[in-house]
Amino acid sequence: MANTLYVGNLNYDTTNEALRAFMSQAGEVQDVRILTDQYTGRSRGFGFVDMATPEGVEKAVQELNGKELDGRTLKIDKARPRGSSGPRQSGSMDRW
């Protein structure tokens, strides 16, 4: 997970290939995974990109975060391990 990036605010029509080409501006891309809805197959608007080096990760965050792809301004950041999204927000559903 050390070289994995979270890429958010993707256009629903963006393909893995288009995202790979975009991210390769920062360095060698090892893998691209745009997450899809299990029932509809439609993009969920975010994905993960594995870069070959830590330098590629840093360059992508610094240079590509906030750039536009397919008409959407991307949010690019280092991926966090699953389940580490921080403390839960309390809300009305938490009381049940």
Image (spheres, helix red, strand yellow):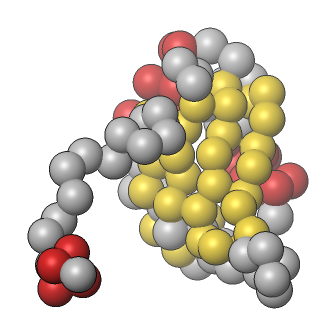
Q: Residue at x 75, y 49 (%)?
A: 33
- Quadrant into which the N terminus falls: top right
Q: Residue at x 81, y 86 (%)?
A: 40
* Residue 13 rendering spot, x and y as whole percentages: 76, 78
* Residue 45 rendering spot, x and y as whole percentages: 60, 71
Q: Residue at x 53, y 19 (%)?
A: 2
Q: Is residue 61 in view?
A: no
Q: Is residue 72 in view?
A: yes
Q: Is residue 33 above or below residue 26?
A: below
- Horizontal arrangement in the rendering, residue 34 relative to residue 67 (left or right): right
Q: Nearer the viewer, residue 77 or 66?
A: 77
Q: Nearer the viewer, residue 45 or 65?
A: 45
The quarter holding residue 52 reads: top right
The quarter holding residue 3 reads: top right
Q: Is residue 18 above or below residue 78?
A: below
Q: Residue at x 46, y 48 (%)?
A: 76
Q: How many marks?
A: 0
The quarter holding residue 84 reads: top left
Q: Is residue 34 above or below residue 42?
A: above
Q: Nearer the viewer, residue 10 or 63?
A: 10
- Horizontal arrangement in the rendering, residue 26 relative to residue 38 (left or right): left
* Residue 96 rendering spot, x and y as whole percentages: 23, 81
